[in-house]
Image: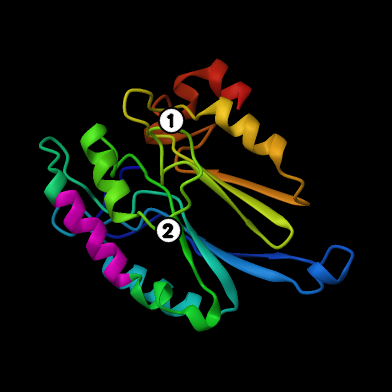
């Protein structure tokens, strides 16, 4: 969602602990980190000081992976240039490189797009080219933007809320099928737009279509 200051005001680092289920497979707890809205303003595509600090903090924890809920970069409003978007997303991955490269810790990065990344089909193509290492099990046309994965006794689902041609909605058909197929003890569903926003984005989030939002 759009920021009104150059500095990051909504990025948060949260560590969730899931405790063991019965049986030896889930004998240990695990943690993961969540962050979002790491973009800067139009002159600073990313809030580098804050994001770099979060990278350091995450590596000092036992986080198994990181969920990034969109608006990674500022993008280009008005004249949205795919070349600029590609450069910014690549810059974001460069800052996150210590996490991407921390194979010893098992840390992985699972990102989803926000409204600062997706403006049209062209920007979707850019996202897919930059994040081609994400799970490819999403619906047609949403590869690397809608997907799911398992981690021990938990199932995680990333939903693209910015789909070109269908913004402020989620792929309910795919979501229902994915949920029906999992037997995980814990299920986490995440994406960029809130279902019940306040302030600036009231009416331009999932609540833009109340019936679809309520079904979700």
- Image height of 80 relative to 112, above or below: above
- Residue at (35% x, 54% y) in the render: 132
User: Would residue 128 appear left or right of 214 to someone viewing this image?
Assistant: left
User: Would residue 132 appear left or right of 35 to someone viewing this image?
Assistant: left
The residue labelled by disc 1 is 205
- The quarter of the picture where the N terminus appears is top left
- Image height of 212 relative to 125, above or below: above
User: What's the magenta bit mostly, secondary-structure-wise?
Assistant: helix
User: Would residue 37 appear left or right of 148 to someone viewing this image?
Assistant: left
Q: Residues within 10 Å of mark 2 (few under 14, many from 20)?
A: some
Q: Nearer the viewer, residue 59 or 10?
A: 59
- Confirm or deny contact between disc 2 and disc 1 (CB under 8 A): no
- Residue at (41% x, 43% y) in the render: 145
User: Would residue 199 appear left or right of 180 to someone viewing this image?
Assistant: left
The residue labelled by disc 2 is 11
Residue 65 seen in this snapshot: yes
**Magenta highlight range:** 84-95
- The quarter of the picture where the C terminus appears is top right
The quarter holding residue 91 reads bottom left
User: Gap in Å between the C-alphas at discs 2 and 1?
Assistant: 18 Å
Residue 205: % across, % down: 43, 30
Q: Nearer the viewer, residue 133 or 207?
A: 133
Residue 23: % across, % down: 89, 67
Q: Nearer the viewer, residue 212 or 65?
A: 65
Please tell me whether residue 80 belongs to the stretch shown in magenta.
no
Count up the numbered dots. Answer: 2
- Image height of 182 relative to 211, above or below: below
Q: Secondary structure at mark 1?
A: loop
Q: Residues within 10 Å of mark 1 (few under 14, many from 20)?
A: many
């Amino acid at each position: 969602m759009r920021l009104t200051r150059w500095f990051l005001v909504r990025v948060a680092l949260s560590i969730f602990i899931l405790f063991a289920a019965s049986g030896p497979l889930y004998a240990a707890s695990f943690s993961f980190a969540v962050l979002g809205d790491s973009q800067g303003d139009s002159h600073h595509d990313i809030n580098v000081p804050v994001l770099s600090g979060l990278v350091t903090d995450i590596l000092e924890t036992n986080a198994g992976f990181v969920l990034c809920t969109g608006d990674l970069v500022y993008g280009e409003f008005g004249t949205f240039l795919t070349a600029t978007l590609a450069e910014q997303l690549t810059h974001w991955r460069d800052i996150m490189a210590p996490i991407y490269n921390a194979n010893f810790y098992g840390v992985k990065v699972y990102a989803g797009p926000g409204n600062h990344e997706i403006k049209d089909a062209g920007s979707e193509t850019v996202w897919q080219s930059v994040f081609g290492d994400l799970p490819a099990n999403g619906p047609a046309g949403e590869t690397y933007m809608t997907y799911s994965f398992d981690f021990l006794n938990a199932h995680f689902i990333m939903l693209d809320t910015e789909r070109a041609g269908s913004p402020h909605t989620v792929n309910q058909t795919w979501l229902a099928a994915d949920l029906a197929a999992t037997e995980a003890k814990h299920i986490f569903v995440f994406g960029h737009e809130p279902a019940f926003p306040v302030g600036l984005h009231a009416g331009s989030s999932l609540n833009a279509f109340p019936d679809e939002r309520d079904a979700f």
